[in-house]
């Protein structure tokens, strides 16, 4: 009996050892657990597009060069439209069809490629852009968009201020200013003028035509580099034989005084005949208002002779 029990104990122990051995063998031969997978690194974020370089408009005219910087933040759609038309060559060959010394010069009408075209100042690109009125004041050197008396009626015509006209502030979209070529602006503004059939009572049709040869859009850095090289080349020339117009063609002056303001509110003389009538020409009504804001009080008989307009040339 005892021996049977002993044999049972030994047999059980042997079976236990066998099971343990098999378990150890299984453990030894089983493949090692796979290393945990590393989370895939997130794809690198796309690099932000480099900020668009400041661009300027280099306007080559038959009287020299003017260079304008833009107010992109205040008038983004107006600036975009002007740049687009310039890059398309839309302005090449046009002229400044309306000039009022001490007030503004106006261009951008495709019809002005022919200085004798009928109804000068009524042309455009075939579409209109929205108004983007802002707080920039209309002082000398400022670029602004022409439009009719209707809202959102601007297109391609623009004007460059030759004086200060508070009556245009907040009524027209100022979208840039000259950073060079103020002397060229003066030359154009001093062009002799005669009666303008498109603007009754206004002597603003130039007798000596100024052509806008081209408008090139480039980075400000590129323009400054070209200007610097041109000045360096000019300085290396002998004193005698320098072209008389070289310096003025590079442009001078900054046109940065944007805080000037004077005159009576444009609405103070709303009784002036024709001032509230739309003519189909950009700025016709403002022409009348601006003259009240910029011209000294004169007897009624002579008031019509010195009228200026803000942006009626279309």
Image (spheres, grey):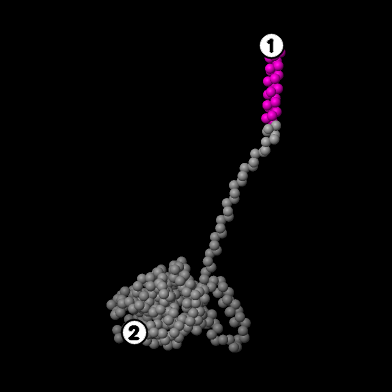
Q: Residue at x 45, y 87 (%)?
A: 208
Q: Is residue 95 magenta?
A: no
- Which x, y percent locates residue 285? 34, 77
The residues tagged by marks 1 and 2 sit, at their Cα atoms, a distance apart of: 143 Å
Residue in the picture at 68% in, 32% down:
26
Q: Quadrant of residue 160?
A: bottom left
Q: Secondary structure at mark 2?
A: loop
Q: Position of residue 165 (x, y in %)?
A: 39, 76
Q: Position of residue 129 (x, y in %)?
A: 41, 70
Compare residues 153 and 28 and report the one nearer the observer.
28
Q: Callout 2: few (<14), some (14-19), or many (20+) C-alpha neighbours within 10 Å?
A: some
Measuring 57% from the left and 76% from the top, which residue is drawn there?
226
Residue farthest top in this picture:
1
Q: In the orientation shown, which residue stands out farthest toward the left?
A: 271
Q: Which mark is residue 1?
A: 1
Image mark for residue 206: none
Q: Which residues are magenta?
A: 1-24
Q: Position of residue 19 (x, y in %)?
A: 68, 26
Image quadrant in which you'd find residue 260: bottom left
In the image, is residue 29 above or below residue 1?
below
Residue named by callout 2: 201
Secondary structure of residue under mark 1? loop
């Amino acid at each position: 009996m005892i021996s049977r029990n002993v044999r049972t104990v030994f047999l059980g122990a042997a079976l236990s050892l066998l099971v343990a051995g098999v378990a150890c063998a299984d453990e030894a031969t089983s493949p090692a657990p796979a290393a945990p997978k590393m989370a895939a690194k997130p794809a690198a974020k796309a690099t932000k597009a480099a900020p668009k370089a400041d661009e300027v408009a280099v306007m080559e005219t038959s009287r020299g060069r003017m260079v304008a910087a833009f107010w992109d933040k205040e008038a983004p759609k107006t600036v975009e439209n002007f740049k687009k038309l310039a890059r398309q060559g839309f302005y090449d060959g046009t002229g400044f069809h309306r000039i009022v010394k001490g007030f503004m010069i106006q261009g951008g009408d495709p019809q002005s490629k022919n200085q004798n075209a009928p109804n000068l100042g009524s042309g455009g690109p075939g579409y209109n852009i929205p108004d983007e009125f802002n707080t920039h004041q209309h002082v000398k050197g400022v670029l602004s968009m022409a439009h009719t008396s209707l809202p959102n009626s601007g297109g391609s015509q623009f004007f460059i201020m030759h004086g200060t006209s508070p009556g245009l502030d907040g009524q027209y979209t100022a979208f840039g200013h000259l950073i060079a070529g103020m002397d060229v602006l003066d030359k154009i503004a001093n062009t002799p003028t005669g009666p303008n059939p498109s603007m009754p009572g206004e002597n603003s049709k130039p007798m000596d035509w100024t052509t806008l040869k081209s408008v090139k859009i480039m980075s400000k850095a590129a323009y400054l580099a070209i200007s610097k090289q041109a000045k360096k080349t000019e300085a290396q020339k002998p004193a005698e034989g320098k072209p008389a117009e070289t310096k003025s063609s590079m442009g001078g002056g900054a046109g940065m005084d944007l805080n000037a303001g004077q005159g009576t509110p444009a609405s103070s003389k709303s009784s002036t005949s024709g001032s509230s009538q739309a003519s189909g020409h950009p700025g016709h009504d403002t022409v009348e208002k601006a003259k009240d804001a910029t011209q000294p009080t004169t007897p009624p008989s002579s008031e019509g002779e010195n009228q200026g307009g803000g942006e009626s040339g279309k």
